Image (cartoon, rainbow, N blue to C red):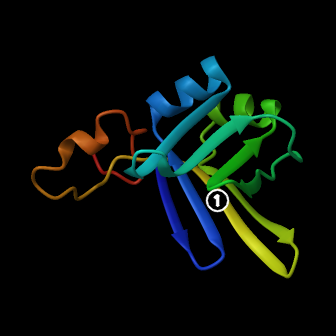
Amino acid sequence: MKLRLKGNSIRVRLDRRDTEELVDQGRINDAVRFGPGLAFSYAVEVGSAPRYRPKASYASGRITIRIDPEDVEEWLASERVGFDHQQVVDGGVVRVLLEKDFACIDRPAGEEADDAYAFPNPSAVC
């Protein structure tokens, strides 16, 4: 799972291994650890969310994105890249993007392992 934060946007990319875990376990988690008991964590979980609009929440140092169960099923059975939702929050809007992680077309040498579980890139020329 890859997380990108920029301004008021949250972008999460899931590879095939991540999506399998999401389906099997109903959730995927990861964290940046700053020492014992100190971590910034993030998760994607199947749960209550408006259709086609993943919902983000933040509490106790953790960002959680929830996605409707039917959305997960349809998304993974299709060529849909992901979801892009403008979530209204107190004082503004948070953009929530949840996407399949595609293999890089031009991966720098030595970083090939990053694509081991990536979805095949539809833009790649074979």
**Which quarter of the figure has residue 85?**
bottom right
Residue at x 55%, y 37% (from the top left corner): 29
Task: Tell me residue 44's x, y (percent).
Answer: 64, 41
65 displayed left or right of 114 = right
106 displayed left or right of 42 = left
Query: 38 or 96, which lies in front?
Result: 38
| Residue located farthest toward the top when viewing the structure as drawn | 24
Q: Which residue is mark 1?
A: 97
Q: Is residue 71 above or below residue 22?
A: below
Q: Is residue 47 above or below residue 62?
A: above
Residue at x 59%, y 40% (from the top left corner): 79
Disc count in the image? 1
Task: Tell me residue 49's x, y (percent).
Answer: 86, 44
Task: Tell me residue 9's x, y (percent).
Answer: 63, 71
Q: Is residue 29 above or below residue 93?
A: above
Q: Mark yes or no: residue 1 visible.
A: no
Query: 112 or 22, which lies in front?
Result: 22
| Residue located farthest toward the front when viewing the structure as drawn | 36
Residue at x 61%, y 64% (from the top left corner): 10
Residue type at numbered disc 1: Leu
| Residue located farthest toward the left when viewing the structure as drawn | 109
